Image: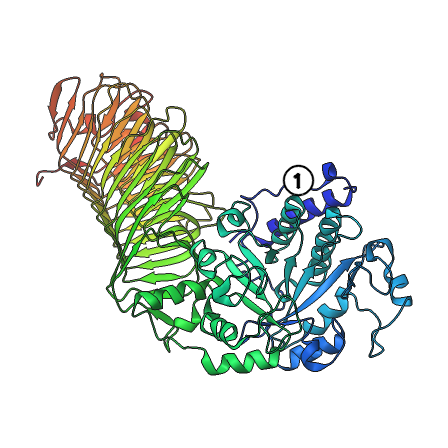
């Protein structure tokens, strides 16, 4: 997982920068680094106190003061909302001149007790008057201490109110967001606070969003924008007026529909759904209330002035699913995972979401995240997609478990984004488990103008941290034509982690791979099972990358001018690894005569970064073919190693043919193409087959096998340990 120390460091850097910001737009904090911002929806065991489980997603507007008769935004109204078990309490907050945050509801002139909050101190505002029940104006710390108690299920929904009287002051929003995030961080209250940001200045809202995310807080933006326009900003949670922004189907007077945001993977909250008139942002008709009750699973939260009433209404209508039995069930499931990535409401008694029917999903883009257990139950999800999304697959981010599911269909992306994540099952996986899943999809990436990196896998595009894959099959087709660099594997394309472990066992791939990449400056990594499994950790003797009882039997054709590292199991490793009892009986063929830097191995293409690896009990019975081209390194077991690498190949067997139609200086061997430095060992291996180099066909025999275990520039027999190797008479 991304560490909390990293999160804290990022937050402190941004917060420190903001402390020096003045009131001009030019001095606002820089736009956040979107690639480094943690996803607050991903569960993190940070040791901080967490709220108890809540049976609803009802937010009490100003504490539900209209229902209780208590002063709005008071500690008394807060306690009332907690007593009825509301998920959240909406509280309006304002930044003060002395860098405080008060909880209050300003009048139409943006005044509290006759004072503009940003022009007065907390003490001055309190001295100017009290609430009707005698309470002094509370500060945010008071509210946090109230909810942050053992057994509380209630969160604060902190609404950062804009100041627009007499003139708009967007810098106020930035200051308020910064200070709120500082307070929440100092009090260790991140699990008890959500943020809402009200405003019309896009840059100010971006800054508020950046502060919230870097502090680990979820934040919604008040907006009436369409899902398409809202999504362009990168925001993933919208808060809308039920009356003013939601459309007629929801009883509102606006143009927005629930479906447009659900389809876009954007969480939705609304304010307010009430039992009677009185709030200009509320709907209260019987038809409108019933619509919200029916569509309740699709909402992250629903705000109301009458929390006890709405909770009671929901308890009578909420459906408990025991799986997904229809297209309609699946659509409801999509709505549920927006607010609850575990989709607990769709789980059976054992906590598993079970698919009970085949599904065909046309024009489908992946939903945001799944953290529960999903059992495909032997069913097939057919996904048909053609567009320019950088995320392609069944789920955008998999942090849970998926088992017994087949993905089919045709998925095609032409995205020119700097990064693309493309996997039939998951665009990205983080700490995921994938068991007995099958890829039968046709995957196409065609974007000649793209210039970044495409992470593409038969099942998973890119892995963050750990992944376990067992009993999985990839038998689809992959076609790639682009100027972007590619990292592709039949199971997954790449992984990236500080301390990650990849365990792939009993997995097979027969994927047909057609690679026509044109990037001649950056490496592309294409493997039968994994493209670039690159984990930086190598702790002790424990391998970070494990492939056991796996195989590749497909046909992999390379054209175009890209630099390529390829392997029938993995294209690359820069971490300690174990490849055991694996089989490579497919073919990898380079058809580009001018191609330089073609590195290929039956098990692994390239190994570097001072790591050690063991290849044990593996069999190469496939074929590696290349037309003429310089700097090619081709081996039946591994292709090339860098300085400091220690690779041991033992108990391995070759039995078929490696072809290289290249000059004699090119490195080619039945076991290794170019083991570059001392430390590599080849022992107890049996070798046979035919090598064709420079038009000369050489049949491996007992007499010449030592010459053709490995060869090539930079390699000499004296720097590789050889022991107990022999001719494979049973080829």
Residue 339, visible in the rendered structure: no
Q: Quadrant of the C terminus?
A: top left
The residue where tag 1 is placed is 30
Residue 185: quarter of image: bottom right
- Residue 410 position, x and y percent, is 26, 47
**Horizontal side, residue 149 vs residue 712: left or right:** right
- Residue 352 position, x and y percent, is 36, 71
Residue 224: quarter of image: bottom right
Q: Is residue 505 above or below residue 344?
A: above
Between 553 and 141, the one nearer to me in the picture: 141
Q: Residue at x 76, y 59 (%)?
A: 94
Between 14 and 724, the one nearer to me in the picture: 14
Q: Secondary structure at mark 1?
A: loop
Crowding around mark 1 (Cα neighbors within 10 Å: few <14, some 14 to 19, many 20+) is some
Q: Residue at x 84, y 57 (%)?
A: 116
Find the residue positioned furthest to the left. 730
**Horizontal side, residue 685 vs residue 85: left or right:** left
Between 426 and 291, the one nearer to me in the picture: 291
- Residue 404 position, x and y percent, is 27, 62
Residue 452: quarter of image: top left
Q: Residue at x 37, y 37 (%)?
A: 646
Residue 14, visible in the rendered structure: yes
């Amino acid at each position: 997982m991304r560490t909390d120390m990293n999160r804290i460091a990022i937050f402190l850097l941004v917060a420190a920068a903001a402390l020096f910001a003045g009131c001009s737009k030019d001095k606002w904090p820089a736009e956040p680094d979107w690639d480094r911002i943690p996803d607050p929806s991903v569960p993190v065991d940070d040791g901080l106190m967490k709220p108890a489980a809540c049976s609803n997603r009802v937010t009490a507007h100003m504490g539900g003061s209209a229902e209780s008769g208590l002063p709005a935004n008071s500690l008394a109204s807060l306690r009332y909302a907690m007593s009825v078990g509301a998920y959240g309490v909406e509280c309006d907050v304002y930044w003060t001149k002395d860098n405080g945050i008060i909880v209050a509801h300003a009048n139409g002139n943006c005044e509290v007790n006759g004072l503009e909050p940003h022009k007065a101190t907390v003490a001055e505002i309190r001295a100017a008057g009290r609430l009707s029940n005698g309470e002094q104006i509370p500060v945010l710390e008071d509210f946090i201490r109230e909810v942050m108690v053992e057994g509380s299920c209630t969160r604060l929904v902190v609404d950062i109110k804009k100041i627009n009287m007499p003139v708009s002051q967007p810098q106020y929003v930035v200051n308020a967001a910064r200070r709120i995030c500082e307070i929440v961080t100092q009090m260790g209250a991140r699990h008890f606070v959500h943020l809402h940001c009200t405003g019309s200045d896009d840059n100010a809202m971006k800054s508020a969003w950046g502060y919230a995310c870097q502090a680990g807080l979820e934040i919604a933006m008040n907006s009436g924008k369409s899902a398409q326009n809202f999504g362009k900003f990168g925001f993933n949670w919208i808060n809308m007026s039920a009356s003013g922004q939601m459309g007629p189907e929801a009883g509102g007077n606006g143009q927005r529909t629930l479906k447009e945001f659900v389809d876009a993977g954007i969480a939705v909250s609304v304010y307010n759904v009430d039992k009677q008139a009185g709030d200009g942002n509320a709907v209260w008709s019987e038809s409108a209330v019933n619509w919200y009750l029916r569509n309740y699973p699709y909402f992250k939260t629903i705000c109301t002035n009458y929390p006890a009433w709405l909770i009671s209404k929901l308890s009578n209508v909420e459906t408990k699913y025991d799986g997904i039995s229809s297209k309609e069930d699946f659509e409801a499931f999509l709505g549920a995972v927006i607010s609850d990535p575990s989709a607990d409401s769709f789980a059976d008694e054992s906590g598993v979401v079970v698919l009970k029917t085949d599904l065909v999903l046309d024009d489908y883009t992946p939903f945001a995240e799944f953290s529960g257990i999903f059992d495909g139950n032997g069913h097939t999800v057919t996904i048909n997609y053609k567009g320019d999304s950088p995320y392609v697959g069944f789920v955008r981010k998999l942090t849970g478990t998926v088992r017994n599911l087949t993905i089919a269909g045709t998925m095609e992306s032409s995205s020119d984004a700097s990064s693309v994540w493309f996997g039939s099952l998951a665009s990205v996986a983080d700490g995921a488990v994938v068991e007995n899943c099958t890829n039968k999809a046709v995957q196409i990436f065609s974007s000649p103008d793209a210039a970044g990196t495409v992470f593409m896998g038969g099942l998973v595009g890119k892995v963050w941290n750990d992944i376990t894959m067992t009993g999985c099959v990839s038998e689809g087709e992959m076609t790639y034509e682009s100027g972007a660099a590619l990292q592709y594997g039949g199971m997954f394309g790449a992984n990236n982690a500080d301390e990650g472990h990849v365990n792939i066992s009993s997995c097979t791939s027969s994927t047909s791979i057609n690679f026509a990449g044109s990037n001649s400056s950056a490496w592309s990594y294409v493997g039968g099972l994994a493209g670039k499994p690159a984990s930086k950790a190598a702790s002790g003797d424990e391998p970070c990358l494990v492939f056991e009882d796996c195989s590749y039997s497909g046909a992999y054709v390379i054209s175009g001018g890209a630099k390529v590292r390829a392997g029938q199991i993995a294209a690359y490793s820069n971490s300690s690894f174990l490849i055991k009892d694996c089989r490579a009986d497919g073919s990898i063929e380079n058809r580009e005569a001018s191609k330089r830097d073609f590195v290929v191995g039956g098990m692994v293409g390239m190994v570097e970064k001072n790591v050690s690896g063991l290849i044990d009990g593996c069999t190469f019975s496939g074929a590696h073919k290349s037309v003429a081209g310089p700097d090619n390194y081709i081996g039946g077991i591994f292709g090339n190693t860098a300085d400091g690498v220690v690779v041991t190949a033992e108990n391995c067997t070759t039995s078929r043919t490696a072809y290289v139609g290249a000059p004699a200086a090119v490195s080619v061997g039945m076991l290794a193409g170019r083991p570059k430095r001392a430390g590599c060992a080849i022992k107890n291996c049996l070798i046979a087959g035919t090598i064709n180099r420079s038009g000369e066909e050489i049949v491996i025999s007992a007499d010449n096998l030592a010459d053709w275990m490995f060869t090539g520039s930079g390699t000499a027999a004296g720097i590789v340990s050889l022991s107990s190797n022999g001719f494979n008479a049973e080829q």
